[in-house]
Image (spheres, rainbow, N blue to C red):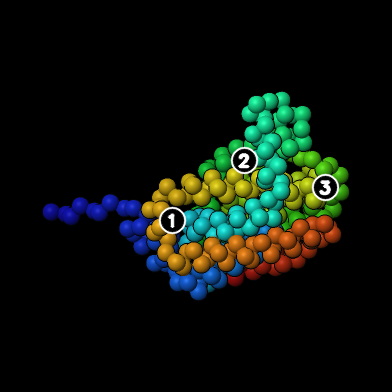
Amino acid sequence: MRQKAAPTTPCSDAKQPLWPCNLSEGIDALTAAALGALQGVTEFLPVSSSGHVAIGAQFFGVVQNSLALVILLHLGTLLATLIVLRQDVVALTKEGIAALRDPDRLRSTAEGRVIVGILIATLLTAFLGLLLRDVAEAFAEDLRLVGFGFLVSAAFLIASGVTRGMSTEVSWWQAIGVGLAQGVAVLPGISRSGVTIAVAMILGVQGNAAFRFSFLVSLPAIVGAAVYEATGAEGLGSLGPAAWIGGATALVTGYVALVILRHIILVGRMWTFALYLVPLGVFLIVR
């Protein structure tokens, strides 16, 4: 009699993606720290953190890479974003509470309109992120696809270099463009920060305002994606010390990279990162 196959779970099959519940089995502390540093630097610089983590995972032999690993490292950079944009986050939180009593504030105040824009972009991001989830897994496993993603990012960065946006506030229709860009950026190789800031600037938003909105929009997207991925895990207590080291390293390096990016945008030099992405993308495609 043929034996009945054992049920497959995220942690029961070596061929399954690297879920948080077996991260401690897939990488050691040094590798986790290296991937955390890679995530922290590339999350905010417009070069695609997911694309570089996919490269790093293969370089370090973590062949069971998946969105779960990427999301875990994103949690460290999420804290970095909260630290740098803490004043904006506090102001928007207060405005959101006030809007519960007076909904008209969502269109009559600048902070209220930002909240609506974030909600619009977040809904579009969630829809596209779920739609493209399986495609993103395939990208992470094929560095040629990651290479094409790098070229897409480079194209947006170059386009942003020839725009002269003047608006200091993101309109609702501009928020739609940013939300669509952030949703597509779930694909490794396509830089979330790069394409969202570039799209906002192409649509007429001034660089500093585009920077601020891009990273405010990233907060609910990262939290939502982390919660979604965590449904396949056994909880934070099962991650092990290596995973925590990776997250802490991503926090520190992410903070530094975020400060650097803000300066680069202020001086209008974000397009220069295309000089790195184009040869890297071509190399991954033709290698």
Secondary structure of residue under mark 2: helix
Looking at the rendered structure, the number of numbered marks drawn on it comes to 3
- Image position, residue 244 (x, y; %): 49, 63
Q: Nearer the viewer, residue 37 or 204?
A: 37
Q: Quadrant of the C terminus?
A: bottom right
Q: Which mark is residue 236?
A: 1
- Image position, residue 275 (x, y; %): 75, 66
User: Measuring 48% from the left and 61% from the top, which residue is drawn there?
Assistant: 65
Say which amino acid is labelled 2.
Thr
Q: Nearer the viewer, residue 108 or 6?
A: 108
User: Measuring 39% from the left and 67% from the top, which residue is drawn there?
Assistant: 25
Mark 3 lies on residue: 206
Q: Quadrant of the N terminus?
A: bottom left
Is 268 left, or right, of 173 in this rendering? right
| Distance in Å between CA atoms under marks 3 and 2 | 21 Å
Secondary structure of residue under mark 3: loop
- Image position, residue 16 (x, y; %): 39, 58
Return the disc, 2 or 1, that comes first in the chain's sequence: 2
Secondary structure of residue under mark 1: helix
Return the disc, 1 or 3, that comes first in the chain's sequence: 3
User: Measuring 80% from the left and 44% from the top, which residue is drawn there?
Assistant: 205
| Distance in Å between CA atoms under marks 1 and 3 | 39 Å
Say which amino acid is labelled 3.
Gln
Circle nearer the viewer, 2 or 1: 1
The answer to whether 149 is drawn above or below residue 276 in the figure is above
Q: Residues within 10 Å of mark 2 (few under 14, many from 20)?
A: many
Is 206 left, or right, of 20 in this rendering? right
